[in-house]
């Protein structure tokens, strides 16, 4: 759940355009390379650029007869290189054709075909990695010669671990998935003092600058890099490192499970449930079509690139934005199977989805930006579907299936201002403390502990979850309140006047429907104990 109220599900894609983003990365890398080449050529310094990829087939694959075929990265690179090299500022700067200036270094199989290298520590000592290392190292000096055409190197993970070249000035991470290898290891391939054609090390820090074209925001890149440096190198950046939060263990009171008051309420709420939903398909089509029709206008796809300088000082990594660009993506996009795409994410029938799109009168927008249209349509339909499902939801107990007592185990937490210290352990299941999520919960716990009419209370553990159509729901509290009668409550604590997100309101509705199936148990949304009256 995001702070703007949107819910993101596993497998969701917002914006997509993975290929377009990677094309832009290649373009920026080539442009940076030519700029650096223009600056350093007269100084006799050869410029190299290094691309990290996670699938060899994206650069080079093979026909069944063993002959190689260019992968999409190689095709894109050559197209981009030709365009950039024809710009007036770069014309004749590199006297080699696109086909000559790039190559890949990968592990090979027994038939001599390139293959992926596993990114595990064990594989670093494997024959695959050794083959890769030797292949690269044997031509290292030739690679630094200005007469050698090769300037752009594509490599899999093994290169990241075992190869150093002082003249790598650009590193581009063309990973279709988030790289699990560390940023420090990636950029380490380019953090070297460069050499000129005479083999002399260049000490000028204005020359020895590495440009990383990363497939993530520079804030994320810098934060991860800094945390890795702190962790692996023992660096302590002034003003950036907070004192480590104290860790402690939440302990359950010995024998709490035999406490009659605990058993009294636990035996009432411990059963798990399943739910059924009913909704009218015609109403779903009508409301979903209206929701899709009222989606924001679909804008053309664009990619924003930001160029940021990162430098180290005593406080850590300091960032300074140098430039930012927005590039509109023109041309024809590949449109996926629209009905299948939405069906996979809503579980509606293709015929229902077809009717929704037809009646929405927005289907032509898919031609402007297919991914954005589909993502927004899925969100709109899901919203309507969730509303209708929860309005008609019905819970029932799953036989005698219940939450298991063995799940009440001591666990570690970080202590903070919302860690509540238990003073009266006879009224709860904890012996020392319990972590809470808000000031409202903290004040509620203080009330429960001090009030005579609260006989027993405890924060429901994180694993006590109720299934709902929009994801699991974990209520806040279980307690026993006694006045003239004994009342057993499950409570959801929220600030007075707090505007709840739509998803929160829906889960609370599910909470009511779930606990309606339990005898003598009331479910309430409250702020203080007095709201239970």
Image (cartoon, rainbow, N blue to C red):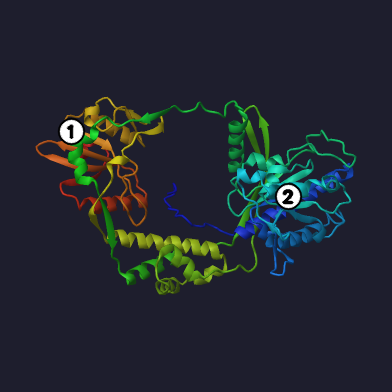
Residue 81 position (above or below residue 133): below
Q: Nearer the viewer, mark 2 or mark 1?
A: 2
Q: Is residue 79 left or right of residue 444?
A: right
The answer to whether one can see residue 313 in this image is yes
Q: Position of residue 190 (x, y in %)?
A: 73, 41
Task: Tell me, yes or no, whether the two marked residues, 2 and 1, touch with CB atoms within 8 Å.
Answer: no
Q: Secondary structure at mark 2?
A: helix
Q: Is residue 12 left or right of residue 90?
A: left
The residue lying at 65 percent from left, 67 percent from top is 331
The answer to whether one can see residue 296 in this image is no
Crowding near pointer 1: few (<14 within 10 Å), some, many (20+)?
some
- Earlier along the polypeptide chain: callout 2 or callout 1? 2
The residue lying at 63 percent from left, 69 percent from top is 332
Determine which of the numbered discs, if any, sits on residue 138 in the image: none
Q: Position of residue 228 (x, y in %)?
A: 60, 36
Quadrant location, the C terminus? top left
Q: Image quarter for residue 83?
A: bottom right
Q: Secondary structure at mark 1?
A: strand
Q: Image quarter for residue 283?
A: bottom left
Crowding near pointer 2: few (<14 within 10 Å), some, many (20+)?
some
Q: Is residue 13 left or right of residue 327?
A: left
Residue for badge 2: 131
Q: Is residue 291 left or right of residue 49?
A: left
Q: Position of residue 106 (x, y in %)?
A: 71, 53
Q: Position of residue 38 (x, y in %)?
A: 84, 48
The residue lying at 19 percent from left, 34 percent from top is 259
3D distance between C-alphas at marks 2 and 1: 71 Å
Q: Foreground residue, 121 or 344?
A: 121
Residue for badge 1: 455
């Amino acid at each position: 759940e995001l702070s703007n109220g949107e819910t993101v599900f596993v497998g969701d894609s917002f914006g997509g355009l993975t290929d377009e983003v990677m094309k832009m990365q290649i373009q920026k890398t080539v442009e940076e390379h030519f700029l650096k080449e223009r600056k350093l050529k007269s100084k006799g310094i050869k410029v190299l650029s290094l691309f990290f990829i996670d699938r060899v087939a994206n650069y080079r694959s093979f026909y069944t007869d063993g002959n190689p075929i260019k992968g999409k990265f190689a095709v894109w690179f050559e197209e981009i290189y030709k365009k950039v090299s024809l710009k007036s500022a770069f014309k004749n700067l590199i006297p080699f054709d696109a086909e000559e200036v790039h190559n890949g270094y990968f592990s090979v199989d027994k038939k001599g075909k390139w293959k992926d290298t596993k990114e595990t520590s064990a594989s670093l000592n494997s024959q695959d990695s050794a083959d890769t290392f030797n292949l690269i190292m044997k031509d290292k000096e030739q690679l630094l010669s200005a007469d050698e055409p090769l300037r752009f190197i594509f490599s899999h993970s093994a290169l990241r671990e075992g190869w150093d070249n002082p003249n790598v000035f650009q590193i581009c991470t063309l990973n279709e998935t988030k790289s699990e290898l560390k940023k420090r290891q990636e950029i380490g391939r380019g953090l070297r003092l460069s050499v000129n054609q005479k083999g002399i090390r260049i000490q000028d820090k204005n020359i020895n600058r590495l440009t990383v074209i990363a497939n993530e925001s520079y804030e994320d890149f810098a934060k991860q890099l800094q945390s890795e440096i702190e962790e692996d190198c023992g660096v302590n950046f002034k003003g950036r490192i907070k004192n480590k939060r104290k860790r402690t263990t939440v302990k359950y009171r010995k024998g709490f499970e035999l406490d009659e008051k605990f058993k009294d309420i636990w035996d009432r709420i411990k059963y798990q449930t399943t739910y059924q939903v009913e909704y009218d398909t015609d109403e779903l089509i009508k409301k979903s079509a209206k929701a899709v029709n009222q989606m924001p206008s679909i804008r053309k796809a664009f990619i924003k690139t930001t160029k940021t300088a990162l430098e180290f000082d005593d406080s850590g990594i300091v960032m300074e934005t140098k430039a930012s660009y927005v590039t509109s993506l023109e041309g024809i996009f590949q449109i996926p199977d629209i009905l299948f795409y939405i069906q996979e994410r809503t579980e509606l029938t293709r015929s229902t989805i077809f009717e929704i799109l037809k009646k929405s009168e927005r289907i032509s927008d898919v031609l402007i930006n297919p991914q954005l249209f589909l993502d927004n349509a899925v969100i709109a339909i899901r919203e309507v579907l969730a509303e209708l499902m929860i309005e008609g939801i019905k819970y029932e107990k799953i036989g005698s299936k219940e939450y298991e007592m063995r799940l009440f185990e001591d666990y570690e937490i970080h202590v903070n201002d919302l860690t509540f210290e238990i003073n009266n352990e006879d009224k709860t299941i904890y012996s020392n403390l319990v972590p809470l999520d808000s000031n409202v919960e903290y004040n509620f716990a203080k009330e429960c502990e001090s009030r005579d009419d609260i006989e027993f209370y405890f924060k429901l553990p994180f694993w006590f979850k109720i299934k709902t159509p929009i994801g699991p729901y974990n209520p806040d509290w279980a307690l026993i309140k006694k006045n003239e009668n004994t009342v057993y409550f499950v409570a959801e604590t929220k600030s007075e006047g707090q505007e709840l997100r739509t998803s929160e309101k829906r889960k609370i509705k599910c909470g009511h429907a779930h606990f309606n199936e339990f005898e003598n148990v009331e479910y309430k949304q409250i702020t203080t104990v007095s709201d239970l009256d």
